[in-house]
Image (cartoon, coloured by chain):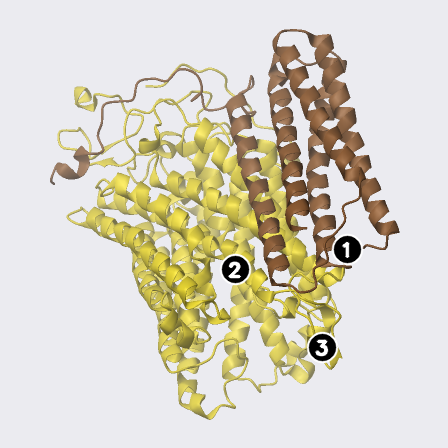
Chain colours: A brown, B yellow
């Protein structure tokens, strides 16, 4: 047979690579390695981005084609919520820096405060819903309110997911069980939290510009 | 050469952890495979009922009345029942067979082994992904047993029909709700699976397994996972909007002033086309989710049994990537009928034609792989060749449908039914059969029966052509699709014998599948014992015992020194070089 068919496939071996390529991560070899966790997180964020992109395009299209759209006055409490969420992200990041330099008690303080603020954000969002409700604005009242309830709920679900990760890390830290193996959990949960934070800013822009 | 044993793992002992809630990717792969087998039986039975009804719309069948006391009163199927059978056939086949077996089934089992990993990156997520899929299937099947029966709105669930509740017809109440909920659960499961596949392929490859040494199967599973990740996220979002329209009174998809069953609906201002855009943004990549793994398996098998390297490996990889990429830009070609601007239609049409280029590259490379090879006609090889045949046949009719001017005529005819069954249905199924015959020895440590396999192949191959080729002629003649009964239309009268022929062919093709099931289950217990590498193939799964041990490589980390398809290399001692063979194979001889 002609050698040209195989010649582009047979190559000198790749040099052995340092790190990774070990076939199975973690200390017991069956868990997720740190790199796989990071990849998994990025992939998850890509999926979340797609889902919210779909909601956004539905939002823009529905707004564009309709003659029944009434702009929604955002409850004022969402501004406070936005601030709370930003500060919580900031605190988590300060905590992460503290951990890198080995100041564990500072980490614990920052992380706990960030987690509590995260929970406070959810309470604030619930207040926003109650205020809208009290004003007689429900899910089906107008497409603008449909989208507001829908997007805050979808975002809130991600907040709940992020909060449970933050709380898990916090409990581990406070019980002095945050070994080097759990540093990945710190990074992954903080990154996820920054993402939902950024997502909320995007949603605020969406509500303000097109809502 | 392999690195020394680092750590061997012991399999869990209890039955439940070993076979039910297992974390082992191999068990999960088999679970997915059997979930798909169950689903394909349900889906196939539904198609037989539909084919029966099209030919005998007035027949009274006693057990119909038992199964569906209201929808088939007196044993005669109502048109609504026909539509619900059609909906469930499409849904179960697309989601629980075509999406499940090639990717989640074979991919779960063989992706980690082929890249030299001990398991998927996130074993618990993997288990959750399977059991979530299982719940989705249970919810979907439950739609058969609720008041009103299963939904009528097709596997595409177009609103307004799907969005306004029981007013729209039987099955549009609870049945449709269960349908949407099931699809949403399925989306979640697929997202979990996709995350696992992508992270595993990127981060858990063994030493020396560079991207250009990946078997093409791994490339297709990887790209399919990316398509699933991006597509199912959008479908999930669309499903949430639809369910809100149904249950919360919102108006995302339901237009104003709609009058259904003599009632004016209170919805206002929604757009049914918005659903179509969101749905097909998922729906078109879904076609590639179904077919890409089949392409990977076909490449692998053609190379193995032609004893030749895959012709143009790199071109194949780039073709897979560009099919995946273009797949996200052509959803509009499902909507030429929707009154879209001709300029948009033109753009979608050109992009659709562009997919013909990578598809042709793949086809020519398959032929190039076969050319001059010492072909071994095993059953797996026959099915892979069948895949190429069906892919070409189905692909060619796609070129017709990709043109707006022609699609306006063809869109609601049997031409479309013939097209998508050929390429998405049967070609993908042939990929699964090929994979089953090829990997069965590795999965169960026994060989399948080749004689039964070949009889099954020939009858199935002729059978599917007999069912689906006439559909193209029916389409040309203007035979509409989605009709439950053709007997009342004068212009269709002369086509009824064709329908009758197709129905007979469907019965025969379905009957011969019994042979496959016999072969499958008989061989599990009584098949000839399989050696480690029965096909003299090169990839990593053939370097370990059949069936593989719990942790695949017995604690050894394999080291890869060769590309995936080094067959008939001049000067080599054998006509194949395993990926783990030493760098200098010539030294051995």
Residue mark closest to the camera, 2 vs 3: 2
Residue at the image point whose x is 33% and y is 68% from the top? B400
C-alpha span from label 3 to label 1: 38 Å
C-alpha span from label 2 to label 3: 26 Å
Quadrant of the drawing holding the C terminus of chain B: top left
Kindly tell me whether residue A82 is visible in this rendering: yes
Label 1 sits on residue: A139
Label 2 sits on residue: B93
Q: Residue furthest right?
A: A134
The answer for which chain carries disc 1 is A
Residue at the image point whose x is 78% and y is 33% from the top? A80
Q: Position of residue A175 (x, y in %)?
A: 76, 14
Specify whether disc 2 shares its chain with disc 1: no
Q: Say which label, 2 or 3, has the lower sequence index.
A: 3
Mark 2 and mark 1 residues within 8 Å of each other at the beta carbon: no
Label 3: state its secondary structure. loop
Q: Position of residue A198 (x, y in %)?
A: 63, 34
Mark 2 and mark 3 residues within 8 Å of each other at the beta carbon: no
Quadrant of the drawing holding the N terminus of chain B: top left
Instruction: Decide: few, some or many residues near mark 1? Use Cα within 10 Å; few <14, some 14-19, many ≥20.
Output: many
Mark drawn on residue B69:
3
Looking at the image, residue B272 sits to the left or right of residue B173; the answer is left
Looking at the image, residue B237 sits to the left or right of residue B9; the answer is right
């Amino acid at each position: 047979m002609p050698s040209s068919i195989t010649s582009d496939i047979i190559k000198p071996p790749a040099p052995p690579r340092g790190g990774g390529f070990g076939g199975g991560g973690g200390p017991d070899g069956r868990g997720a390695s740190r790199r796989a966790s990071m990849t998994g997180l990025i992939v998850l964020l890509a999926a979340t981005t797609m889902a919210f992109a779909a909601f956004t395009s539905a939002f823009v299209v529905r707004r564009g084609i309709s003659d029944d759209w009434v702009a929604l006055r955002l409850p004022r409490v969402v501004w406070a919520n936005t601030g709370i969420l930003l500060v919580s992200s900031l605190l988590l990041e300060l905590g992460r820096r503290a951990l890198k330099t080995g100041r564990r008690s500072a980490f614990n303080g920052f992380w706990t405060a960030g987690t509590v603020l995260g929970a406070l954000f959810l309470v604030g969002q619930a207040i926003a819903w109650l205020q809208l409700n009290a004003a007689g604005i429900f899910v089906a009242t107008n497409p603008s309110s449909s989208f507001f309830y829908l997007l805050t709920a979808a975002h809130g679900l991600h907040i709940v997911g992020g909060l449970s990760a933050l709380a898990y890390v916090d409990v581990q830290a406070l019980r002095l069980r945050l070994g080097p193996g759990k540093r990945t959990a710190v990074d992954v949960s903080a990154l996820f939290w920054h993402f939902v934070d950024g997502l909320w800013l995007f949603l605020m822009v969406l509500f303000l510009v097109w809502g | 050469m392999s690195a020394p044993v680092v750590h061997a793992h012991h399999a869990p002992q209890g039955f439940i952890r070993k076979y039910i809630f297992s974390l082992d990717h191999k068990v999960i792969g088999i679970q997915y495979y059997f979930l798909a087998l169950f689903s394909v039986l349900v889906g196939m039975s539904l198609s037989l009922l539909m084919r029966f009804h099209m030919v005998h719309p007035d027949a009274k069948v006693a057990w119909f009345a038992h199964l569906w006391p209201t929808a088939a009163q007196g044993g005669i199927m109502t048109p609504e029942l026909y539509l619900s059978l059609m909906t469930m056939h499409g849904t179960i086949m697309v989601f629980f067979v075509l999406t499940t077996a090639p990717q989640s089934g074979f991919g779960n089992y063989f992706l980690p082994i082929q890249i030299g990993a001990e398991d998927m990156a996130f074993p618990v997520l993997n288990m959750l992904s399977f059991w979530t899929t299982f719940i989705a299937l249970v919810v979907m099947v439950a739609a058969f047993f609720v008041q009103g029966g299963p939904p009528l709105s097709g596997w595409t669930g177009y609103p307004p029909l799907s969005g306004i509740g029981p007013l729209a017809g039987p099955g549009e109440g609870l049945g449709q709700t269960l349908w949407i909920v099931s699809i949403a659960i399925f989306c979640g499961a697929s997202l979990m699976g996709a995350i696992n596949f992508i992270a595993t392929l990127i981060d858990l490859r063994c030493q020396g397994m560079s991207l250009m040494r990946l078997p093409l199967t791994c490339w297709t599973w990887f790209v399919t996972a990316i398509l699933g990740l991006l597509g199912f996220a959008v479908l999930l979002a669309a499903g949430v909007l639809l369910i809100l329209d149904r249950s919360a009174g919102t108006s995302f998809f339901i237009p104003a002033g709609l009058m259904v069953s003599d009632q004016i609906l209170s919805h206002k201002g929604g757009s049914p086309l918005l659903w179509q855009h969101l749905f097909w943004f998922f729906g078109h990549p879904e076609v590639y989710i179904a077919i890409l793994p089949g392409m990977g398996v076909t490449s692998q098998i053609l190379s193995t049994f032609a004893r030749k390297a895959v012709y143009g490996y790199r071109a194949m990889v780039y073709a897979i990537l560009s099919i995946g990429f273009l797949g996200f830009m052509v959803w509009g070609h499902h909507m030429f009928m929707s009154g879209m601007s001709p300029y948009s239609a033109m753009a979608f049409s050109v992009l659709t034609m562009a997919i013909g280029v990578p598809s042709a590259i793949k086809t020519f490379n398959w032929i190039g792989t076969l050319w001059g090879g010492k072909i071994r006609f095993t059953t797996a090889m026959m099915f892979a060749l069948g895949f190429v045949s069906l892919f070409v046949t189905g692909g060619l009719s796609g070129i017709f449908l990709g043109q707006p001017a022609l699609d306006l005529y063809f869109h609601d005819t049997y031409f479309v039914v013939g097209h998508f069954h050929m390429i998405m249905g049967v070609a993908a199924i042939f990929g699964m059969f090929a994979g089953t015959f090829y990997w069965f020895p590795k999965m169960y440590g026994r060989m399948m029966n080749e004689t039964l396999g070949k009889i099954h192949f020939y009858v199935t191959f002729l059978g599917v052509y007999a069912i689906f080729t006439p559909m193209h002629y029916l389409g040309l003649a203007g035979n509409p699709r989605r009709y439950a009964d053709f007997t009342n239309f004068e212009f269709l009268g002369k086509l009824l014998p064709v329908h009758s022929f197709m129905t007979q062919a469907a019965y025969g093709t379905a009957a011969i599948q019994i042979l496959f099931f016999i072969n499958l289950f008989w061989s599990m217990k009584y098949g000839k014992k399989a050696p480690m590498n029965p096909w003299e193939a090169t990839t990593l799964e053939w370097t370990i015992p059949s069936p593989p041990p719990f942790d695949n490589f017995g604690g050894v980390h394999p080291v890869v020194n060769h590309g995936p398809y080094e067959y008939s290399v001049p000067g080599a001692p054998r006509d194949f070089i395993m990926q783990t063979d030493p760098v200098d194979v010539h030294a051995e001889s």
